[in-house]
Image: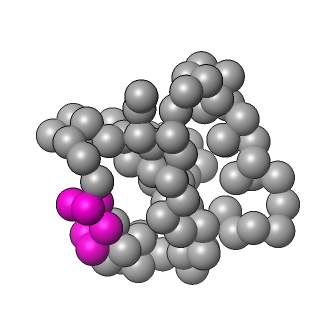
Amino acid sequence: MAIITLTTDFGHKDHFVGAIKGTIYNELEDAKIVDISHAISPFNIQECAYILKNSYKAFPKGTIHIVGVDAECTAENQHLAVYV
């Protein structure tokens, strides 16, 4: 069973967190989703890096960490996947 963490600047006021979780469950029904934070200050990559640095090591090897901070894909702002 996959563990997937979410760290975003989406907040909790609208549909974005629910929509991303629904999309994940459509692909992986038995996934375990852990919300690290959705309260990162908007577009604050440094704040997100601090939170991730202090949380990701607590998860088992193979955990998938999804980060959505300043996440709109543009020519200047490409999405990135990293395998460690």
> Please, is residue 20 above or below residue 30 in the view?
below
Residue 27 belongs to the span the image colors magenta:
no
User: Residue sitting at 20 percent across and 42 percent down?
Assistant: 61
Q: Position of residue 53 (x, y in %)?
A: 25, 69
Q: Position of residue 23 (x, y in %)?
A: 67, 31
Left or right, 4 with respect to 70, comes to left
Q: Quadrant of residue 35?
A: bottom right
> Please, is residue 6 above or below residue 31 in the view?
below
User: Residue sitting at 15 percent across and 40 percent down?
Assistant: 84
> Please, is residue 54 above or below residue 2 in the view?
below
Left or right, 15 with respect to 40, comes to right
The answer to whether residue 69 of the structure is visible from this angle is no
> Please, is residue 1 above or below residue 39 in the view?
above
Q: In the current view of this chain or complex, which residue is farthest to the top?
A: 27
Q: Position of residue 1 (x, y in %)?
A: 42, 28
User: Residue sitting at 45 percent across and 50 percent down?
Assistant: 5
User: Residue sitting at 21 percent across and 60 percent down?
Assistant: 57
Front-lying residue, 24 or 79: 24
Q: Position of residue 31 (x, y in %)?
A: 52, 32
Numbered range of the magenta stretch: 53-58
The majority secondary structure of the magenta stretch comes to helix
Front-lying residue, 1 or 72: 1
